[in-house]
Image: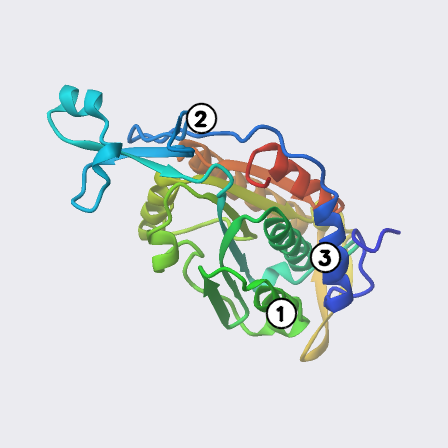
């Protein structure tokens, strides 16, 4: 069995993260980057100016270069507008990883949390290898870490290693959504945002923040499930955590109700994400993190 698909332990070590670097390097070539348009009329284009790529068009500000004023739009609207540019190879990426206590579970291969962490590791390594700018915010257990600085790969990998520890299952999880109440997401603009979380619901304030994030960025939402959990035979199971082993009784009716509740909530979430313009994709725990990373590559979220 592949050490990537079924690691020896759900708690990942330095050797495993070094292995992820190799997989990240050999993902293949990215297709031509997918540009996106927002509801507000901003868009990225391949039009060049001064050796750079145009990112957006916005109202003129006092600090803007006068050479970048778009005179056609200014004449049409009666308000000065500026073209903003970025280096052609400067890909801005924001990684949001949020793991609930329920993610520290799996019936086959490994935990859902571990699969998310493996994927986050590949994203981190790939960003480093391609020279892309990676900001991140990760929450797990009672921990929260964030950074928008370059050169923080070793620190991020240490956080991911810590996030894989089973003890996080018993430490609770962040009550608010990963994209809310932070300057890192509030100021995100023209970035490829990758959300990795097992959560499926949010309140009205969190929904407004998510809509704002999707309005100004290209957002990719990755969901990983263990479909086998709904096919377990009725009976009593032994569940282990930091507090020891305890029996859990599962009946056919409780299993059917749990599946129905999940599908109903998931359908609602998918519809909402689609209405926000967020690309959502669901994967099973039996699929490798390399495959999921290749999907992100095909969508332009990785390069």
Discs 1/3, front: 1
Compare marks 1 and 3 and give the one earlier in the sequence: 3
Frontmost residue, 164 versus 85: 85
Q: Quadrant of residue 107?
A: bottom right
Q: Residue at x 57, y 40 (%)?
A: 263
Q: Residues within 10 Å of mark 1 (few under 14, many from 20)?
A: few
Mark 2 and mark 3: Cα distance apart in space: 44 Å
Q: Is residue 163 above or below residue 281?
A: below
Q: Is residue 258 left or right of residue 50?
A: right
Mark 1 and mark 3: Cα distance apart in space: 23 Å
> Percent from the top left, x then y, of residue 123?
61, 50
Q: Residue at x 54, y 62 (%)?
A: 151
Give the secondary structure at mark 1.
helix
Compare marks 2 and 3 and give the one earlier in the sequence: 2
Q: Is residue 46 above or below residue 190?
A: above
Q: Residues within 10 Å of mark 2 (few under 14, many from 20)?
A: few
> Percent from the top left, x then y, of residue 284?
70, 44
Identity of the residue furthest to the bottom in this view: 243
Discs 2/1, front: 2
- Which residue corresponds to mark 2? 46
Give the secondary structure at mark 3.
loop
- Which residue corresponds to mark 1? 158
Numbered badge on residue 106 = 3
Give the secondary structure at mark 2.
loop
Q: Residue at x 38, y 53 (%)?
A: 185
Discs 2/3, front: 2
Q: Is residue 81 above or below residue 241?
A: above
User: Is residue 55 at least partly visible in the picture?
Assistant: yes
CB-based contact (under 8 Å), mark 2 and mark 3? no
Frontmost residue, 151 versus 107: 151
Q: Quadrant of residue 190?
A: top left
């Amino acid at each position: 069995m592949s050490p990537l698909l079924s690691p020896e332990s759900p708690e990942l070590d330095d050797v495993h993260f070094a292995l992820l670097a190799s997989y990240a390097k050999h993902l293949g070539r990215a297709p031509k980057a997918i540009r996106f348009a927002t509801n507000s009329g901003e868009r990225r284009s391949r039009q060049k100016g001064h050796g750079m790529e145009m990112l957006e068009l916005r109202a003129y500000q006092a600090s803007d270069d006068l050479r970048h004023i778009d005179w056609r739009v200014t004449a049409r609207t009666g308000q000065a507008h500026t073209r903003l540019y970025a280096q052609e190879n400067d890909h801005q990426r924001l990684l949001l990883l949020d793991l609930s206590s329920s993610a520290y579970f799996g019936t086959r291969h490994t935990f859902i949390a571990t699969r998310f962490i493996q994927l986050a590791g590949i994203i981190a390594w790939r960003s480093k290898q391609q020279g892309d700018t990676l900001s991140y915010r990760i929450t797990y257990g009672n921990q929260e870490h964030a950074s928008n600085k370059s050169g923080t790969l070793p620190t991020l990998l240490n956080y991911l290693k810590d996030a894989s520890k089973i003890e996080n299952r018993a430490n609770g999880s962040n009550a608010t959504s990963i994209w809310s109440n932070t300057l890192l997401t509030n100021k995100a603009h023209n970035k490829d945002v990758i959300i990795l979380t097992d959560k499926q619901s949010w309140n009205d304030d969190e929904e407004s923040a998510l809509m704002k994030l999707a309005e100004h960025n290209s957002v990719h939402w990755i969901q990983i499930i263990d479909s086998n959990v709904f096919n377990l035979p009725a009976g009593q199971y032994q569940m282990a955590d930091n507090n020891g082993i305890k029996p859990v009784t599962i009946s056919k009716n409780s299993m059917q109700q749990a599946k129905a509740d999940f599908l109903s909530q998931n359908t609602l979430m998918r519809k909402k994400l689609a209405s926000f313009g967020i690309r959502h994709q669901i994967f099973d725990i039996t699929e490798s993190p390399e495959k999921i990373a290749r999907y992100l590559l095909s969508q332009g979220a990785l390069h």
